[in-house]
Image (cartoon, rainbow, N blue to C red):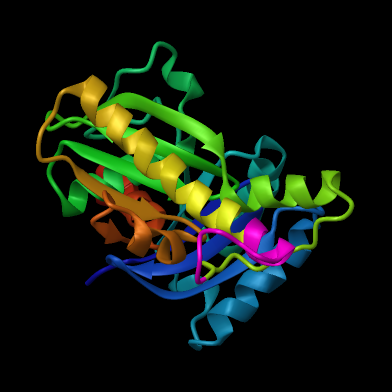
Amino acid sequence: MMRKLLCIDIGNTHVVIALMKGEQPLVSIRIPSTPLLSVPDYTSSIENMLSELKIKPVDINGAIISSVVPRLTGPFQEVCKSLTKHETLIVDHTLPIDLKINYDDPSEVGADRICNAVGALEKHSGPLIVVDMGTATTFDVVSKKREYLGGVIMPGLETAGRDLFQRAAKLPKVSFDFPKKIIGTKTRDSLQSGLMWGTIDQIDGMIKRIIIEWGEKDVTVIATGGLSEVIAPHSGYIQEVDKSLTLLGMTYIYEQVLGDRS
């Protein structure tokens, strides 16, 4: 029987909480990362999520946390402890998983990037590039030998847009949609063109540079994260979108580390 695993992916903008059964999320919610709430508030949100499927906390077989926000890691450890009696696994570079991290300082690799690499390797063989479009847009480079080779970090689309709207008083906020034309004849269209097509050119340009420097052929490029489904269809390199890639990686990390103990 496949275990029901509580996965908590703590990002800079949102906390994604999902109950996974095997590779599939049964139910999930997104909570803003700020402001910081109380442990009972977070616990109540998860209990409400579980109640949608008439699942009780006692039915959870384990918990895993991937966090890039240290101030939230502790509170969610307490949440997991209050909900389930099972050991909660915290993703970091020290875990004995089937991924070699070839970073100068492995402790600098974000937990989400480790999860993305593991998730991608469960669905595809290397060489791989994982593009995660969140608060930052990250590019993770994974070899056919299951080595995390490093990557690139740049501002995400929403981050760049929000900063532009805040700094330029006369520029209106716009939705993240592609305009019909590149050359805008209205400020709103010009903004959308710059943000959307500029992001495409940044992403495709960076992927091209990575592949040239890497020297690998037949590289599989996978996208995940917030706006990946909007951006990816316009990319000349991205071959697949998997919005659950981080969660998938978390489930496999849990299996590799604690699977035989829970």
Residue at 50% in and 88% down? 54
**Residue 42: x percent and y percent?**
70, 63
Q: Is residue 172 visible?
A: yes
Q: Is residue 255 visible?
A: no
Q: Viewer-proximal residue, 144 or 181?
A: 181
Q: Which residues are magenta?
A: 180-191
For residue 147, what is the image quadrant?
Answer: top left
**Residue 206: x percent and y percent?**
38, 34
Asked if residue 65 lies in the magenta stretch, the reply is no
Q: Is residue 248 above or below residue 206?
A: below
Residue at 12% in and 32% down? 144
For residue 156, what is the image quadrant?
Answer: top right
**Residue 179: x percent and y percent?**
54, 68
Q: Is residue 92 above or below residue 18?
A: above
Which quadrant does the C terminus fall into?
bottom left
Q: Is residue 113 above or below residue 81?
A: above
Which quadrant does the N terminus fall into?
bottom left
Residue at 46% in and 39% down? 138
**Residue 8: x percent and y percent?**
53, 56
Residue at 52% in and 79% down? 56
